[in-house]
Amino acid sequence: MIPAILIALFQGSSHLPISNGWFVLIVLGTYTLIQQIENNVLVPRIIGGSVDLHPVVVLVGAVAGASIGGILGIFLAAPTLATVRVLAGYAYGKLLAPGEEELEEPETAGAEQPPTGTREMLNEDLAQGGETAREP
């Protein structure tokens, strides 16, 4: 922003008929607006999408990281939150996973099951006295 303000101050605008002082204020306002949009909208969405976190979580994490670790805390907030999310999901899955007893099949699973599909329909048709087509 500093080079743009210096150029606006010393060179002025070639398109707008205003003084250099007003042009500096326009450049300063434009840079401030762009920075606010970038820092509050784009960066959380981009970082949140890359680490699969909601942008609000990234913003809150960045604020918490800033209060705990300063600039380094801001930079490490999103990767730390993503790591905590993965580890918590793993622990949650391990603690609430079904036991091995529930995964075993009952003893009757090995018994022969009644026929299904076309063979069953043919058997029902024969039992009712109907004729069925014979295979060649």
Image (cartoon, rainbow, N blue to C red):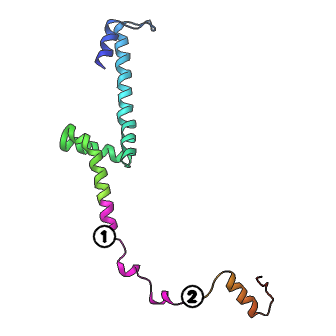
Residue furthest to the right in view is: 131
Q: Earlier in the sequence, mark 1 or mark 2?
A: 1
**Residue identified by numbered label 2:** 113
Q: What residue span does the magenta drawing correspond to?
A: 88-112
In this view, the residue in front, 120 or 19, is 120
Disc 1 element: helix
* Amino acid, disc 1: Leu
- Tell me if residue 87 comes above or below residue 108 in the rendering: above
User: Residue 95 has which mark?
Assistant: 1
Q: Residues within 10 Å of mark 1 (few under 14, many from 20)?
A: few
Residue appearing at x 67%, y 86% in the figure: 120
Image coordinates of residue 62 in percent, x first then y, are 28, 42
- The majority secondary structure of the magenta stretch comes to helix
* Amino acid, disc 2: Gln
Residue appearing at x 81%, y 88% in the figure: 131
> Where on the picture, by quarter, is residue 22?
top left
Residue appearing at x 51%, y 90% in the figure: 111
